Amino acid sequence: MTLSTASISSEQKNAQLPINLVPYRLSINELERLFSTDRANGLTSSKAKDLLVKYGANNLGEGASISLVGIFIHQACNAMVMVLIISMVISLAMKDWISGGVIAFVVFVNIFVGCIQEYNAEKTMSSLKSLSSPTARVIRDGEDQTIPAEEVVPGDVCIVQVGDTIPADLRLFDCMNLETDEALLTGESLPIAKMHKEVYNEEIPVGDRLNMAYSSSTVSKGRGTGIVVCTGLQTEIGAIALSLQEKTSHVRSVEVDEHGNKSGYSRAIFGTIKDVVGAFLGTSTGTPLLRKLSVLACGLFCIAVVFAIVVMAAQKFHVTSEVGIYAICVALSMIPSSLVVVLTITMAVGAKIMASRNVIVRKLDSLEALGAVNDICSDKTGTLTQGKMIARSVWIPTVGTYTVHESNEPFNPTVGSIKFIDAAPAEVMNSENDTITFTAVPTPNPPHFQQWLETATLANIATVFTSLDEDGQETWKAHGDPTEIAIQVFTTRMDFPRLKLTEGDDSQFTHLAEFPFDSSIKRMTAVYKGLDETTVFTKGAVERVLECCDTWYGNSGSNETPQKLTDDDKAFIEENMNALSSEGLRVLAFSRRATTPAEASMNWAGKVDRADVEKNLTFLGLVGIYDPPRRETAGAVKQCHKAGINVHMLTGDHPGTAKAIAQEVGILPRNLHNYADDVVKIMVMAAPDFDKLSDAEVDALPVLPLVIARCAPQTKVRMIDALHRRKKFCAMTGDGVNDSPSLKKADIGIAMGITGSDVAKDASDIVLSDDNFASILNAIEEGRRMAANIQKFVLQLLAENVAQALYLMIGLVFMDEDGYSVFPLSPVEVLWIIVITSCFPAMGLGKEAAADNVLEVPPTSSIFSWEVIIDMFAYGTWMAACCLCTFIIIVYGKGDGNLGISCNSTSGEFCDTVFKARSGSFATMTWCALVLAWECIDMRLSLFKMHPESETPYTQFFKDVWKNQFLFWSVIGGFVSVFPVVYIPVINDKVFLHAPISWEWGLAMAFTVLFWAGAEFYKWMKRIFFRKRAYLDAVNNPEKDLERKSPFETYKSFSRSNTMNV
């Protein structure tokens, strides 16, 4: 029997367990019969042993051993690495030790880094196991026993108390002030008060099951006893562990029809072969860029083999050593061997930059993927908000509403301001915005507000104080419960700190007794002796405080004498409570009364009946508390929208709180009344409503929800799946164990560094060291910068490969007297150009700064866009043409056209003209490739006008090329390197097979300038083309720009269409 309650959706899918038999929907008597246990005596030892055999140990599995050999093979067997290994072998076979050594180093670095990352990922389960409790306290054979937690079985009666880690999922049947911290599972920022008497008649989220206590959560207050209903992998935490253990199989199954007949064997076989080969070569796994690079590597390798065969065929398959080497060089010219080098170094530099911006990169290959993110699913508590509480509104019925504004430091009472409005919260909510008028705070404090301040500060045990930090600066700090701290900060702001009233020579109050907060009655009370009388001060949940009140001062005027509190009055108070709650505030009520003379003289240190104290109270007012957004959040969300990124909030909090915070930070529009009701329901959904929808129904929604409240782990995973089905590239943030499945499922998993669990960090791709949503924007900005730079150096490398391949293949038409091709570049020249013009300039392009509008353009996941492909062939063809013209003019224009004999080797005769032509074309190709690196800084703007708005247009070119000094010196160094290899004796004619030149330098320089001019002319035509296309788009779709500027335009359009259809 399985009693897993991992999520609502898992309940629905569990066919062997009726929906009404899940533990939180059963009474204790039903559970006792179901497990054949007894709440008083527990299980017998013999039955516990039998159940241990049946259900297994209460752990998350032993976990398979990590195979280092398997990890190594997985990292080595992908297309890019295999092509690099082949290139390395060829280079070493040609005795090109430098190229071979560099490629070997790159292969080593890639495999080593990949192995480290995969090894760390395999250790995720160990973090989960560390969450379990080592021992458990149970009742067996009628005796209280402490046993190893692994021996706990379903049916055990388990006892927990403050500080314990709960060993298994429990259905509580007794508790006293029990509160558990379930942040790891639900994301709830505050401890959950449990109520064992609750029995539910419907499906509810994990965080709302108050009669359950879950494995690996901790007891923060009180004690409790319950029956174990799930152990090991059947618990909530176990369900998460199972989701992390899921492995994708490359073996496709045979189709089975409704009659059990199998078919489609051939599809299964060939599909399996395709999946296995794709996984082996890396064409079907990894990030989009890595998959495309693997496909590119396979394609280029095939083309390289074809080109090598063509070279040998052109020589009538008379393959000498020179022909073989040339064929290999032609093949190598098609393989951008430095691409992976540059990619690795660029990512390493990007990771270092991100670390300085509070983003720690765990997986390097996730960096380029950040630029493609178009949807972010974020948690609320601690990420969008500060994770601390602030008193936002105070309502005093006879006075009005006090509101705190611009307070982003929860412990600092001196930051922010207080505004006052002479109206109740319900009136403010129902009025138009332009009718709300804030006035100055009444001074001195009205008497009823004064009474409220005294009650708020004295019915409170939190302390707010100042101390010096490490730099000697005075800073505000606080001790106590977050809710009480928020109230104490407000009273301190009003100059009513508790210590001022209770300590010192002029203290006004002396503490007599205290009745602490009790989760069963949701109140706390303090009794103080004042100068004239003894007073009872009470605060707590509104409905529980009103139970103890029989008077209030009315809702208007300045009545000195309390009036009777009627049912209509209570309804009015609850209406205002709901108004505050609708703003996402946690609402508490305050009351007080003076004691009778008999009570004043009683012994408060003795036993006092709490019920006798908390009665006949006078209601004073309400306070609304909330977890405020970080000051950077609203701006970051706005910038995300501007960058074309949708932001979704997936939180464990209540819908009202989630909706209010989402509106405050800009995830939801503030003017929801402008949208149709059914659209608002889609914008904000509760997890149970979302989980009830099938995948088809979710896909049929015109838009996906912007806010989902009361999220279970499976809800977040379903949201990511829904985004993937819409071809979205999404990032997911999280900090708890409950977030780890969605972090793993998302394209980019983002964990919190401060509050994040080890499990969440292990499942993530990057970690925010400051837990700040705004840092995600930093990561995306850096990711877009890297993606743009990768696109730049990929264009530069591949355009150069196209130029070399065309030039070397067309050059086969130059035949000597013996009928063999005279190579227009020698093999060593080819390798030299590859080393000098590919690696270092491409690394320089990888270090380019981000464009000014990097966060103002829509995200893109395509490095190999049509623009890049067309540019690659345009630049490559033009470069090859310039080099060919140089060679032809030297040989046939100035020269006599004599191609000599055996000029492909050092023993050739009459090769002076060929050697000089090679020198000229060698210089031309080297310089053109270096110029291309500069031209690739921007794919459309002219190199001479990168900043059209510059106030110094004539010198801006020099500033732009000097700004990236690595690229500058790579180009200058490569430019200068041509001269030594042309003039140094022996090296020139014996190694490079070229000769010193004179007037040919001018020709090489002229064609380099011509290539530069052609590149600028091509960019000019591109700018005209894209301007015309943008104009036509604006004419044909005038609302396109409006939709780009407003992230909610799609919802509003949907609202209009719905309204029209009604």
Image (tube, rainbow, N blue to C red):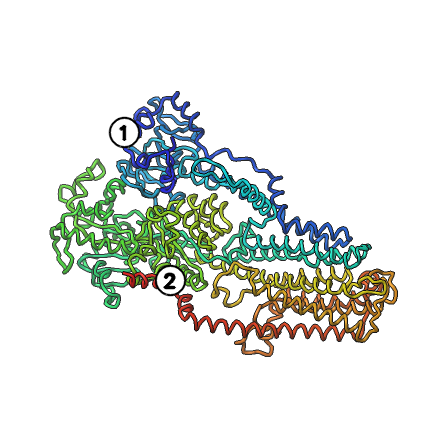
Q: Is residue 551 above or below residue 17?
A: below
Q: Is residue 888 left or right of residue 461?
A: right
Is residue 279 positioned above or below 981 on the image? above
The quarter holding residue 169 reads top left
Residue 950, image quadrant: bottom right
Residue 201: x and y in percent read 27, 39
Please determine whether, in this image, residue 1039 is positioned above or below residue 415.
below
**What secondary structure is found at the residue carrying circle 2?**
helix
Q: Residues within 10 Å of mark 2 (few under 14, many from 20)?
A: some
Label 2, label 1: how far apart the Cα atoms are: 52 Å
Q: Is residue 384 above or below residue 237?
A: below
Q: Which residue is mark 1?
A: 29
What residue occupies the far top of the structure in this picture?
46
Residue at 55% in and 50% down? 286
- Mark 1, Cα crowd under 10 Å, few <14 / some 14-19 / many 20+, is few
Q: Is residue 790 visible?
A: yes
Q: Nearer the viewer, residue 610 or 819?
A: 819
Determine the residue positioned at 50% across, 54% down: 359
The amino acid pointed to by label 1 is Asn
Image depth: mark 2 or mark 1 in front: 2
Q: Position of residue 815 (x, y in %)?
A: 81, 65
Q: Identify residue type, mark 2.
A: Thr
Residue labelled with disc 2: 1050
Residue, x 30% and y 40% (percent of image)?
A: 210
Drawn side of residue 24 relative to residue 443, left or right: right
Res 439 seen here: no
